[in-house]
Image (spheres, grey):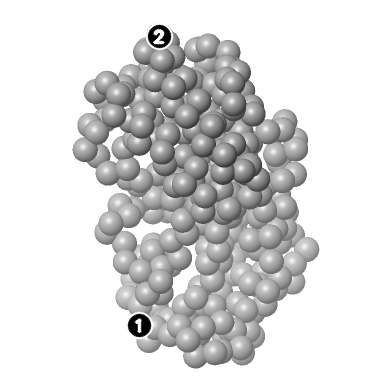
């Protein structure tokens, strides 16, 4: 999980600038000032002072550690397999998200070798399915030296391999448990992201400086969390909170090509008030066109 704090702030500021018909000015970075309310960024938009705080939602417990280890553990598999995937195809390996965490170096090397050999020999024999059609395909496979079953799909792809972020082998990390369990875990992760300290930092600017406070929740998860789910969870969290922000947004950065900004709450209006009918994001952004508003 890579957080995009500066670009997330820039995206929200662009939305606020369009809404207010004014541009940002008098930008401050309270953390650098060792301010009592060390939010990410404070600035004026027109005559209104805004204070912005950003945080990432961890899609599942242990993801940060998983990503820290991803290149070492899964990089060799991607490198070895990608060179044999034919043009016009994408192979997708699905495995338990934390299945190799805590394993010894020897165990990981054995699993890597076994998975590489399995994918190379098995994928060409699988039916070629429409992209991301997981409804069809073989049942899970059990492989020697791999401590869990895996699934493998072979998809058609019209995306040129030169597109940034394109991978001929995709490795999907699956979180165990039923939807009720995952919902409870998701609620805890959003509660963790919206911890009291973040609200307190924003409240300093609201009570002492009259700022309009904005919380940005960044979501990198394409599979387990979406804007409706995040809105439900967030609104449950702030229902009995006396110092919740004036505005809260979900910034979705799970795709390489487009990022999306959704409102969770603006004043007394919630996501579900705003989207009583058709649903469109408040902003759609090309990542490379955003700048880091926090220099981080």
10 Å neighbourhood of mark 1: few (<14), some, or many (≥20)? few
Query: Callout 2: helix, strand or loop?
Result: helix
Up-down: is 58 above or below 76? below
Q: Look at mark 1 in the image and give the residue it sits on.
A: 25
278 relative position to 14: left or right: right
Give the percent coordinates (x, y) of residue 116: 44, 27
The residue that appears at 42% across and 10% down in the rendered structure is 126
Q: Position of residue 216 (x, y in %)?
A: 52, 63
- The residue lying at 47 percent from left, 78 percent from top is 41
In percent of the image, x 58 and y 13: which residue is there? 139
Which residue is drawn at the image coordinates 59% and 27% (left, top)? 146
Q: As drawn, is 295 to the left or to the right of 39?
A: left
Let me know if residue 221 appears in the view.
yes
Residue under pointer 2 = 125
Task: Establish if 55 lies above or below 164.
Answer: below
What secondary structure is marked by label 1?
A: strand
Write down the quadrant of residue 28 in the picture. bottom left
Given residues 24 and 201, the one toward you in this image is 201
């Amino acid at each position: 999980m890579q957080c995009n704090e500066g670009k997330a702030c820039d995206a929200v500021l662009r939305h606020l600038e369009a809404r207010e018909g004014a541009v940002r000015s008098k930008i401050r970075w309270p953390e650098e000032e060792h301010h009592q309310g060390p939010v990410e960024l404070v600035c004026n938009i027109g005559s209104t002072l805004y204070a912005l705080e950003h945080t990432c939602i961890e899609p599942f417990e242990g993801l940060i550690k998983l990503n820290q280890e991803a290149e070492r553990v899964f990089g060799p598999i991607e490198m070895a397999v990608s060179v044999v995937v034919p043009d016009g195809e994408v192979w997708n390996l699905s495995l338990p998200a934390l299945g190799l965490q805590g394993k010894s170096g020897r165990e990981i090397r054995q699993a890597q070798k076994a998975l590489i050999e399995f994918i190379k020999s098995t994928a060409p024999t699988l039916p070629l399915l429409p992209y991301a059609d997981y409804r069809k395909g073989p049942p899970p496979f059990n492989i020697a030296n791999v401590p869990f079953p895996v699934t493998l799909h072979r998809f058609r792809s019209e995306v040129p391999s030169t597109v940034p972020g394109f991978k001929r082998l995709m490795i999907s990390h699956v979180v165990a448990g039923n939807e009720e369990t995952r919902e409870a875990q998701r609620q805890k992760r959003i509660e963790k992201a919206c911890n009291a300290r973040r609200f307190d930092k924003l409240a300093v600017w609201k009570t002492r400086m009259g700022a309009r406070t904005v919380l940005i929740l960044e979501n990198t998860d394409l599979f387990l969390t979406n804007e409706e789910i995040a809105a439900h969870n967030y609104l449950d969290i702030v229902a009995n909170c006396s110092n919740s922000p004036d505005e809260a947004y979900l910034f979705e950065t799970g795709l390489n090509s487009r990022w999306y900004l959704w409102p969770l709450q603006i004043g007394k209006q919630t996501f579900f008030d705003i989207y009583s009918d058709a649903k469109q994001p408040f902003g759609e952004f090309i990542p490379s066109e955003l700048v880091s508003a926090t220099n981080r």
